Image (spheres, grey):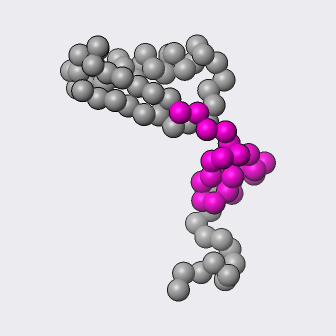
């Protein structure tokens, strides 16, 4: 049966992590009919300094806007 792997930035409390695990288990059970004792889930927490979107590191102060970029904004990185 299913194993679900979640990769995320650190979750700020054990209570929130527990709630996430419980709710995902509930959705899998209710949506797919998987027996509860066959659903396993793991959470891998990655520090923002080790995560990037669009080549922008997660701990960059402007991550929310910079990580939405569609190009590097310079000719040095243009595809050939």
The residue most toward the left is 33
Residue occupying the point 51% across, 37% down: 7
The residue most toward the right is 61
Above or below: residue 31 compared with residue 72: above
Where's residue 58, x and y in %? 68, 47
- Displayed quadrant of residue 33: top left
Residues in magenta, as a range: 44-66
Residue occupying the point 53% across, 86% down: 80
- Displayed quadrant of residue 28: top left
Magenta stretch encompasses residue 5: no
Where's residue 64, x and y in %? 68, 48
Left or right: where does residue 78 sit relative to residue 37?
right
Left or right: where does residue 45 sit relative to residue 40?
right
Magenta stretch encompasses residue 56: yes
Residue 30 visible somewhere in the drawing: no
- Displayed quadrant of residue 25: top left
Residue 40 visible somewhere in the drawing: yes
Q: Quadrant of the N terminus?
A: top left
Above or below: residue 77 compared with residue 59: below
Above or below: residue 67 compared with residue 18: below
Residue occupying the point 78% across, 48% down: 61
Left or right: where does residue 24 sit relative to residue 77?
left
Q: How many marks?
A: 0
Q: Nearer the viewer, residue 3 or 30?
A: 3
Residue occupying the point 63% across, 78% down: 77
């Amino acid at each position: 049966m299913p194993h679900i792997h979640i990769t995320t930035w650190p979750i700020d409390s054990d209570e929130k992590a527990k709630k996430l695990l419980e709710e995902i288990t509930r959705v899998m059970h209710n949506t797919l009919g998987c027996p509860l004792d066959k659903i396993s889930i793991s959470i891998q927490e990655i520090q923002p300094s080790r995560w990037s979107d669009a080549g922008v590191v997660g701990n960059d102060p402007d991550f929310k806007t910079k990580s939405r970029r569609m190009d590097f904004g310079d000719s040095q990185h243009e595809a050939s």
